[in-house]
Image: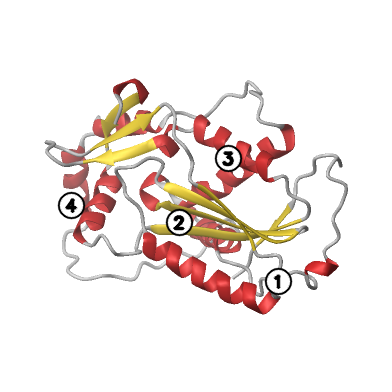
Amino acid sequence: MQGKNIEDIYELSPMQKGMLFHFLFDPGSEAYFEQISCTINGPLDEARFKTAWEKVILDHPVFRTSFHWRNMEKPLQVVHRQVAAPWQSMDWSEATAADQEEKLESFLTADRKKGFSLKDAPVMRFTLIRSCYLKHHFIWSHHHILMDGWSIAFVLREVFRYYKEGAADRGRKLPGLYRHYVSWIQGRNHEGANEYWRRKLKGFASPSLIRLAASTDGVMPSAARAAEAVAETSRVRRFIMWRQRPFSCPGTVQNCKRRDPSMEVRTPTVTASA
């Protein structure tokens, strides 16, 4: 870890500490391994796509973060100024649709088993598989310690915005840094919060079913609205995260017509389903 490449150092959030504990307790577990796999339909400029991802990585420090705990009083996360995003390209266009399906199954399994080293940034990697000229399969793997599932759709939206507009600095204002959240949560009165919940949950000795109150005025109670929002987010996540079946081109490689590479840049269509 070179000092000149260090941008920032700060503690982990409580949730990150919990994930680190489970990672160290069972390094081979896939519990927090996130694997977003999707099909990209239409002409794709790989260089432009990769540059879009590099720009997003540069925008968000958490994507340039490594985690360290050995010989330390408490674990720390280190933000690096520059990181090289692991990017793998493969061409399966000469394989049949059935062979591609089988190879994809094997690749996804091997990718999960490979896991991550949290000490090496970035704690994620990318694979772009060319199925034919008009279809690619894209796999974005990362450890859950980097971000929550709610953020995935926003990240993908930023990537394709950069892909469409180019990687030039648009001067947009980025959201707050993660270190600000860590500082905020460290300043909270944790003992007071613990005491509050001890009082509220006093008498509960086992998991209990929480029933949502019915609304009499046609307006959802806040808890019900929250539950509906969670359900909707879950549906969106399943749409984005799970791999598409079947994975195949509309025909063999001979039927994939190559278009003029000088055509205008268009955002390709991304599809995924459970």
Identify the residue at horizontal 58%, vertical 55% (top origin).
Answer: 219
Report how far apart the C-alphas of labels 4 and 2 lie in the structure: 21 Å
Residue 4 placement, left or right of 98: left
Report how far apart the C-alphas of labels 1 and 4 lie in the structure: 57 Å
Q: Which corner quadrant of the image does residue 41 belong to?
A: bottom right
**N-terminal of the two: label 3 or label 1?**
3
Mark 4 Cα shell of 10 Å, populated few (<14), some (14-19), many (≥20) = few
Residue 99 picture location, percent across and down: 63, 76
Mark 3 Cα shell of 10 Å, populated few (<14), some (14-19), many (≥20) = many
Circle 2: element type: helix
The residue type indicated by label 3 comes to Trp
* Residue bearing the label numbered 3: 53
* Residue bearing the label numbered 4: 199
Report how far apart the C-alphas of labels 2 and 3 lie in the structure: 37 Å
Furthest toward the front, the residue is 94
Q: Which corner quadrant of the image does residue 24 belong to?
A: bottom left
* Residue bearing the label numbered 1: 248
Circle 4: element type: helix
Mark 2 Cα shell of 10 Å, populated few (<14), some (14-19), many (≥20) = few
